[in-house]
Amino acid sequence: MEETRFEGPWWPAPAKLNLMLRIVGRRGDGYHLLQTVFQFLDRGDRLGFELRGDSRIRRRGELPGVAEEDDLVVRAARLLLREAAGGERSGLPGVDIHLRKCLPMGGGLGGGSSDAATALLVLDRMWGLGFGRPRLAELGLALGADVPVFVHGFAAWAEGVGELLTPVEPPQPWYLVLVPPCQVATAEIFRDPDLTRDSPRIKIRDFLADSEVNDCVAVVSRRYPEVARAMAWLAGHARPRLTGTGGCVFACFEREADARRVHALVPEAYRSFVARGRNRSPLLTALQAE
């Protein structure tokens, strides 16, 4: 993304991993019912916000392939401004949104949803709305099923379409994440006739006892050979896993040194990085420090 001049402050929009993903049914409206576990990473995008002299919401800089009106962070800001105006808070200033994009699109790391959540939380503060996280999470759900977990900011066991959240405290290891050269289309994966849609429901204790199934692995690997090759390479060094319905694959390590040792061996065909798992969102830490 083309950067524009901005002095800060910059706010974190952390990545997430799905530590497991089970598809346990389907609603009448076509949405899939899930069981999953979200955990944050200490790596992600960064956003800056500048209040304007008018009421417009604008994105500063270009994001290749994403029109401004389709950008989740712009939609989140406009939604929040409409909600504020509906509550007789007219006269609020607009905002210019600056984005330092680090997370890949279509990678299953939650970049767009995290950006939207950061916009909701930071602008709620800048505009003095005081909506609070429960209401902001409700607004975020209209933008995407992953937005509420980023708003609440705690690692969570999630059910429903991903919006029914129970805080959990899994270990916080070091992760090596590989980014294959492809963007996985979530809707395409959920439409695939071979996708498992009837996994038995499990309990949180089952996950904590080492249930790491991702029901999307077979379909994603078949449709995206780049993902299959990344998982095969990683399998030679650690236990490979897929995050969500995206393209990124990962493995966990107890020690940072072990993660970085394998990271040094990653073929040039893949972008990759090492990050620490976090049960508390870096955005919440930044907001409280501010």
Image (spheres, rainbow, N blue to C red):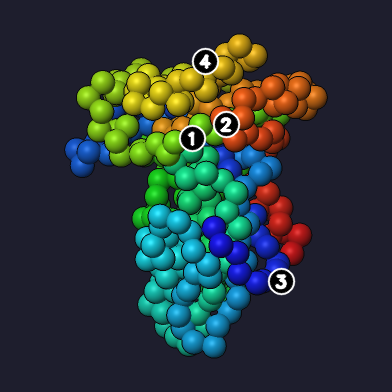
CA gap, disc 2 and disc 3? 32 Å
Q: Which amino acid does label 3 sit on?
A: Glu
On screen, residue 241 above or below 11? above
Report the Cα–Cα distance between label 4 and label 3.
43 Å
Could you tell which of marks 2 and 3 lies nearer the N-terminus? 3
Cα distance between the residues tagged 1 and 3: 32 Å
Disc 1/disc 2 C-alpha distance (Å) = 7 Å
On the image, the x and y values in percent for residue 100 come to 61, 58
Residue annotated with mark 3: 7
Residue, disc 1: 181
Label 2 or label 3, whichever lies nearer to me, is 2
The residue nearer to you, when weighing 48 against 132, is: 48
The percent position of residue 177, horizontal first and vertical second, equals 61, 31
Q: Is residue 266 left or right of residue 19?
A: right
Residue under pointer 2: 270
Q: How crowded is mark 3: few (under 14 residues within 10 Å), some or many (20 or more)?
A: few
Label 2 vs 4, first from the N-terminus: 4
**Residue type for callout 1:** Pro
Q: Which residue is drawn at 51% across and 31% down?
A: 180
N-terminal label among 1 and 4: 1
The reply to whether dot 1 and dot 2 touch (C-beta < 8 Å) is yes
Q: How far apart are marks 1 and 4 (CA)?
A: 15 Å
Q: Which residue is drawn at 20% across and 42% down?
A: 29
Return the residue at label 4: 232
